[in-house]
Image: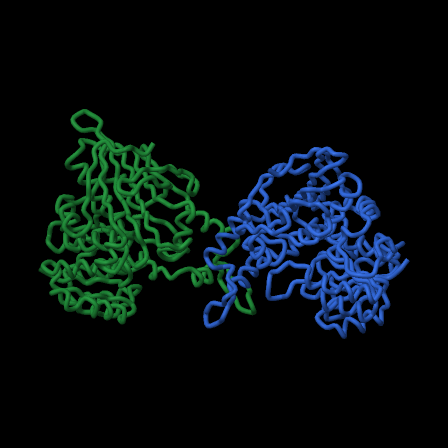
Chain colours: A green, B blue
Amino acid sequence: MGKALIIGCGGVASAAIHKCCQNSEVFTEICIASRTKAKCDALKEKLEGTTSTKITTAQVDADHVDELTALIKKEKPDVVLNLALPYQDLTIMDACLAAKTHYIDTANYEPEDTAKFEYKWQWAYREKFEKAGITALLGSGFDPGVTGVFSAYAQKHYFDEIHYIDILDCNAGDHGYPFATNFNPEINIREVSARGSYWENGSWVETEPMEIKKVYDFPEIGEKDMYLLHHEELESLALNIKGIKRIRFFMTFGQSYLTHLKCLENVGMTSIEPIEFEGKQIVPLQFLKAVLPDPSSLGPRTKGKTNIGCIFRGIKDGKERNLYIYNVCDHQECYREVGSQAVAYTTGVPAMIGAMMVMTGKWLKPGVFNVEEFDPDPFMEALNRWGLPWKTEEQPELVD
Amino acid sequence: MGKALIIGCGGVASAAIHKCCQNSEVFTEICIASRTKAKCDALKEKLEGTTSTKITTAQVDADHVDELTALIKKEKPDVVLNLALPYQDLTIMDACLAAKTHYIDTANYEPEDTAKFEYKWQWAYREKFEKAGITALLGSGFDPGVTGVFSAYAQKHYFDEIHYIDILDCNAGDHGYPFATNFNPEINIREVSARGSYWENGSWVETEPMEIKKVYDFPEIGEKDMYLLHHEELESLALNIKGIKRIRFFMTFGQSYLTHLKCLENVGMTSIEPIEFEGKQIVPLQFLKAVLPDPSSLGPRTKGKTNIGCIFRGIKDGKERNLYIYNVCDHQECYREVGSQAVAYTTGVPAMIGAMMVMTGKWLKPGVFNVEEFDPDPFMEALNRWGLPWKTEEQPELVD
């Protein structure tokens, strides 16, 4: 079928690349490019012999449009799948425009110095992509990503009008450590210390950090505490689901995780202000990172499941209807299959599928789009086939 | 009256020295000696002009018997008051023997490499002190110290036989930080992670660390969680209170303090194993100490009270009797008076009184003794006079 240029070689990229290599009919060729070419080469070496996908690698600094453009022009991929850092979305979009190549990513652009999850920077590219005749597919991970596809699917098949959406992200994985972070603890801390917000009756309602706590009994997992956070898909779904009255996003955090984070914050161990120690300036958070287990060591030891999905409330044929669509993923099964646990797997698989939607022409129109703006059916079918089977449940327990 | 040589110049020593200077009739002269003479000089400068006690200072390394002996022979004090580190008790006792000078301390000797609170090393000096015709008074702080005097006083005036003693040490001070330690966090951690023990029916009963938790409603403070710990006076009281069936020691710890300590332990921040950080070997606990508030900064900001005392159960005139003797101390009042909060004050005042008991000849007999082996009455009177007034309560709430 075609060729994808994949930028990035971290955990999510690794999961996506494994899945591309399982899907050689579509991905006959991939080029893996990142700042550290050796990481790409190691992954190539691991996969070669297990796949008929042809794999090449390249070095690229995704902060530089010129370098990126030259690489795209040289490799001539059908699509560019951006799995680098969110800070690099705009440079990669600029390069795709310069090289007239379709673009797919999983997380929206954020300036490096703020913690603002907003689509405004990327939506500003709409006209440019339209004029260039190329497609930019934004946020094709799980959340955002699959949550938007679930919404479009519910809208298409189950509802005349959706009034309420609750997005529920539950990670019930247990790595056996009293405390460890899946990735940079700074990002974890920013997440739980940021103000929350949700969309209601046409405007944003802000909450204190972690102010709204609910308990939900997740299918295949059980009861977990979850907290209302802001999340980027709230912004696009509020626009794209007509008639919507309220959208909220909840993520589970265990009490022990939050207690450890709070204690570390209280004593100053999460501070990014350097302190003087034995004649050296040391940033406490950097030292904390060095003491904590290496996030990459968690994969093989994480047990348990994730459950991410959406609960919809709305009207069908004049009657109220409630529907839950969700996927359950097992950390250890993911690790056995692609060498990453479920957090990377659930983002990497939809990234591969998004690239496939564009390459196969199923999701192709000039401009910049979020996933819910396309026909959800082929994506939903692909989720079942490529490792993220979903379930629907009528009349689920609602979040109060 | 006479002259005391005070070894040590930390928080407890400072409180004791302030009290000696209030008591110039007994302490006509004091010499303050420590490793860092500048600290002694600073304290001398602060006190001179406020007292008729003559103050001199000296430099001494309390690890060296020869240095200590030379200092005692030069200064010719009536007593040596040891407020240095517990590791240094034996060198100072050896020097007192060599110089034939009475000895008083507040905490029993412990070898630097263990956490064993045992009197055996110091009790082994009994015969030497007896032969030299000098007195060694051990453990004249609050606990041990006043708790032993309370026991002797209860025995003398209130009971024919004491069967049960519960020693209750409550510090309800609040320094306003989410977490800070009064002194070296390593010692705090050792305290809560050590196995507990109590004396019952002639032998020691060991418990898991923090296994036994009780709630007690402390006079002038209210309900606090307290935990059974081993404590050194259990050992001497078990010998010296005839007919005793059980002695226990409880100390209060707030849930938040314990949670912070546990979280820090869980993530490895209390470890004494160095880790590699930016090319340097750094001990996590050392780094943690550097991040936490400096213990010496807590004094001026600590509010609230301490309540330390003993609950006795026994027989008087054939009937069961229960009695509580305790002292309540206010952190801010202590700080205003002597520049130290109540934890240092409650140890420093009994140290001064112990020295006074020996200097005035009220507690003087050749050998090595614990406080409860002397007549408690003059000590109890001195407590009321010198800032640690005590109360008795008949039929107190018992610890279940």
Q: Residue furthest top?
A: A318
Viewer-side residue, A300 vs B11: A300
Q: Quadrant of residue B397?
A: top right
Quadrant, the N terminus of chain B: bottom right
Task: Give the left or right position of residue B136, taking residue B219 as reference.
Answer: right
Residue at 55% from the left image edge and 58% from the top image edge: B291
Give how far across and how far down residue A64 sits, in percent.
Answer: 29, 65
Instruction: Tell me where residue A311 appears, x and y as whole percent.
Output: 26, 37
Q: From where the camera sits, is residue B305 visible?
A: no
Q: With respect to residue B368, does B240 lie above or below?
A: above
The number of callouts visible is 0
Front-most of residues A13 and A362: A13
Left or right: A360, with A241 as reference point: left
Considering only vertical position in the picture, is B46 above or below B160? Answer: below
Residue A88 visible somewhere in the drawing:
yes
* For residue A189, side relative to residue A303 (left or right): right
* Residue B194: quadrant of the picture: bottom right
Q: Residue at x 17, y 55 (%)?
A: A355
Q: Toward the viewer: A154 or B73?
A: B73
Residue B284, horizontal then vertical, whole percent: 51, 63
Nearer the observer, A24 or A123: A24
> How far from the left and from the top, in percent, is residue B388?
77, 45
